[in-house]
Image: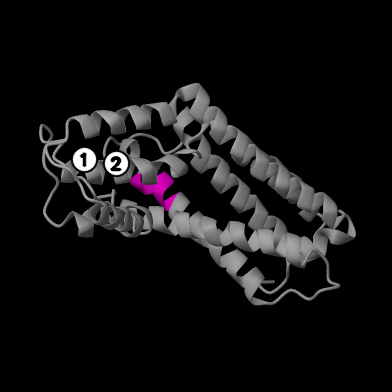
Amino acid sequence: MFTSNPFAEISASIAPAGMQAYVVIMVLMVAAGTLFDILHKGSAKYFFDNWRKSKSKAAMQIGGSELVSHAIKTGLVDVLASGEFCNARRRLAHLLTMYGFLIYVITTAIMVFGYPTHATPTPAVLPQLWWIGGLMICLGGYWFWFFIRVDVAAEGGSPFRIMRADLFVLSLLGSVTVGLIWAFLQTRGSSGASVFFGLYIIATTVLFGSVPWSKFAHMFFKPAAAFEKRVSYANESRSNLPAPADKPELFGSAREQPRHY
């Protein structure tokens, strides 16, 4: 089961070109949704306006080498290590979901485009990584949803209370969950596999098609915002705000309350 390429298995009923076209359409939907987010919500304009205001209020100038240093710290701490999250459980859940998503998406693309049929045997490591990535998403996502969310963990709210801001995490969990069930049933030769494949396509389309209304696009803006925050603290343009805790390189660029995805 864990060494079988599910996309090669389904090539007998769905042409590989169809699956490849679908993946390309999903990529285009993400690009279009992100562009819409930038133009409609003014995300880029807000960032650059904030950056200009920060530079105008700077008490000291930052050299090129220091900017590079802050950029590296942003990449290593804020992006790769999710340093913005103060709560260890929240950070771990986020990292599981983030890295699981990357592994899952990358291996999906490789299998769909590189090994679309059984004519070219799929290296066993690719389906294995696909399963690992999917299970990491489920572990981190469901852990966050049922036990870590602020309104659930701190306020005692119902884990089944749904808001518009939850669209991304719910569509992600829905897509991956039914995708794993489809792959499992397909290897068993179950007739229900086709039903879950249909659900997989629907959930995945919602995930990538709802970018303008979900938090999906935030993953493209957050690194830039984290970099700007580090620079603004370094040039003291945020001197009127509470200073970050000691050793921000270990725990993040600024001390803030834990946030949702």
Q: Residue 242: x percent and y percent?
A: 11, 38
Q: Label 1 crowding class (10 Å Cα cut-off): few <14, some 14-19, many 20+?
A: many
Q: Residue at x 60, y 40 (%)?
A: 30
What separation in Å lies between label 2 and label 1 (alpha carbons)?
A: 6 Å
* Residue 27 located within the stretch drawn in magenta: no
Q: Residue 9: x percent and y percent?
A: 81, 64
Task: Tell me the quadrant of the picture where the C terminus can be found.
Answer: top left
Look at the image and give the residue range highlighted in magenta: 142-148
Q: Nearer the viewer, residue 74 or 63?
A: 63
Q: Label 2 crowding class (10 Å Cα cut-off): few <14, some 14-19, many 20+?
A: many
Please tell me whether residue 211 is drawn above or below residue 139 in the rendered image. above
Q: Is residue 260 left or right of residue 103?
A: left
* Residue 147 located within the stretch drawn in magenta: yes
Q: Nearer the viewer, residue 13 or 62?
A: 62
Q: Secondary structure at mark 1?
A: helix
Q: Residue 156: x percent and y percent?
A: 30, 36
Residue 103 visible (yes or no): yes
Q: Residue at x 72, y 42 (%)?
A: 25
Marks 2,1: beta carbons within 8 A: yes
Q: Nearer the viewer, residue 234 or 255?
A: 234
Predominant secondary structure, magenta span: helix
Name the residue beneath numbered marker 2. Answer: 228
**Mark seen at residue 232:** 1
Residue 185 visible (yes or no): no
| Image quadrant in which you'd find residue 254 | top left
Q: Secondary structure at mark 2?
A: helix
